[in-house]
Amino acid sequence: MSALGGPAQTGGVQPPTAMGLVISIVLIVVALALAFFLVQMAGVIALAGIIIGGVLIAFGVHFVPVGGAPAAMGQAPGIATGVAMLAAGAGLAGLFGGAWAAPFGLVIALAGGAIGGGLLMAITCTMVNVIYIFGMGIPSASGKVDKDPITGDTFPEYKSQGTEGHGLPFISWVGGVVGGALGGLGGTLIYLELLDIYQAQLPVILDVTVEQIASVAVSLAGIFAVGMFLMNAVLAAYNITGTIEGPHDPKFKRFPRAVIAAAAASAVAGIFAIALLELVGVF
Amino acid sequence: MSVKIEVGAGGIPHNQILIYGLVGSLVLVYLTYLNTVTNTQYFAFFGGLAAVAALIWGTDTIKHLCSYGLGTGVPSAGMIALGSGVIAAIFGATTGILAPIVTVIIAAIIGAVAGLMANHVVRMDIPVMIISLIELAIVGAMTVLGLSAMACGTFEFLGMITGTVVILGFAVEAYSASVIGGSIIAVIFMLGAIAIQHSFNACLGPGEQQDRTLMLAAECGFLSMITVAIISFAFIGLLAAFVSLLVSIIGWIYTYTQYIALSKRDAYAWLDAQPILEPKGGA
């Protein structure tokens, strides 16, 4: 058995089909209506937060310089692993930061999440360049642009023949940190919205105090945030198909497709997360 | 960038594996309900076997999907499977006796949305994308539900969030000492994700054979089962947990020896490495 189809390899960006757009808008509207029906205005606000979180994650993934297997051999710029793995690493680090800061209020928790994700990517990108430059002895050079948009460094003189560039130029480093911060912010936003819902509903259903149920609410919100994070990250990865250098890469322009897909997928997954406790004790 | 991944031809048709996997995992999860019927905990291990059945089916699905060349690596398919599956599994668990069936339906809905988004908005245009993501979401959900049922002896939500702690000789109900309250669900999530994404990733290539890949999937499943069996000592009776551990270890040893035998069958040649013995009296 061999490949019969596969992603169409055309030069430009294929826009979403009309059917896809209609389905995503219908899904988002239906999910918001259901959220209002189930938990009133709090549900709508929570679902809107979850959708914004999902969109931030999908958008953030496009900033992260992903090199894949070619980068491991020094034949392409970026970090030598897949999109899903990198996004998961940055997002989960952000989620830990945000969850730790949750008791300090929304703004500090979101900042904590963004700093957690950004910090992980900053350390990763720095260590990647340490290994590339001092371990493998290769300079950083982008294959997609001739000049670094931030520092103005030129690349063609340093790019080896037969490669798409190598190492991690400064613009990719910045992209990685921005992507990690956006991912951490989005993951933390989903977590906080769900935590509010569960902390309000669980004590009523089980007739216990908030303190007794805290661990269950935290765990449920956390695992749902992780699940939604991975869904959105993989949809963004499918959008990128393979490797991306960062915000200067032509593939970056594809991000509107991933944003639409992530919004619809988050809305559907989010409505199940919000409605989780509606059926407890019914059957 | 998309790379065609060679997979072996022949073997059992995918639809047959689909039916065996779906029916098998549903029946096996329902067998854990014998715990409630007979008021014991000895049948918890059926949950793990359900996860193994689902993982074998999921590995064959990943093989089908990834033969089209996603460009994002095989593990991304496993991450979206468990990411959408865990939401469906926990939502389904709240419906009591109907849990496994509701889980399958919810997972199919979430998977269908992810598939539609991937094909019609992100424009992957892969013919099997939608059906594969539906299957993978169900696989992820049944894996999480099965392993959770194995850890705490029941697939019902209230059983997953309540545990008992012995304080001064008295058994006290505590929400933090439970599968979800203790965040064991996150460990189960990763155990399932590693099991589903490893087998095809390890076996793909020109010499890929279906029986070998699926045997590795079963081996990974039993390996995850061993870990969950050890976790289950904290939640179910000592003897019941020993039964689970015994079943997992026997299953793992059997599948591991079978996998090694199949690898030797498919290998061109192999070296049975022996330790070098010191000659008597010194060299």
Image (tube, helix red, strand yellow):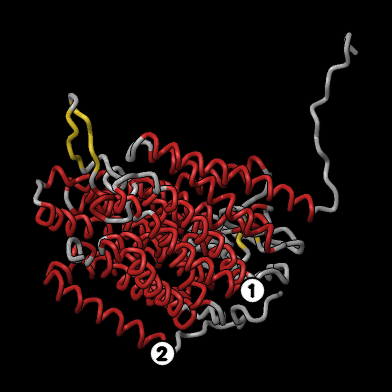
Q: Position of residue B187 (x, y in %)?
A: 40, 46
Of discs 2 and 1, which sits in the foreground?
1
Secondary structure state at the residue bearing disc 1: loop
Q: Residue at x 46, y 57 (%)?
A: B50
Q: Residue at x 65, y 58 (%)?
A: B213
Q: Residue at x 15, y 54 (%)?
A: A202
Amino acid type at mark 1: Pro
Distance between mark 2 and mark 1 Cα atoms: 32 Å
Q: Residue furthest top?
A: B281
A211 or A57, which is in the foreground?
A211
Is residue B117 left or right of B270 when viewed as pictured?
left
Name the quadrant of the C terminus of chain B.
top right
**To which chain does the residue with label 2 belong?**
A
**To which chain does the residue with label 1 belong?**
B
Number of the label disc, if any, that sits on residue B13: 1
Residue occupied by mark 2 = A19
Quadrant assignment, res B72: bottom right
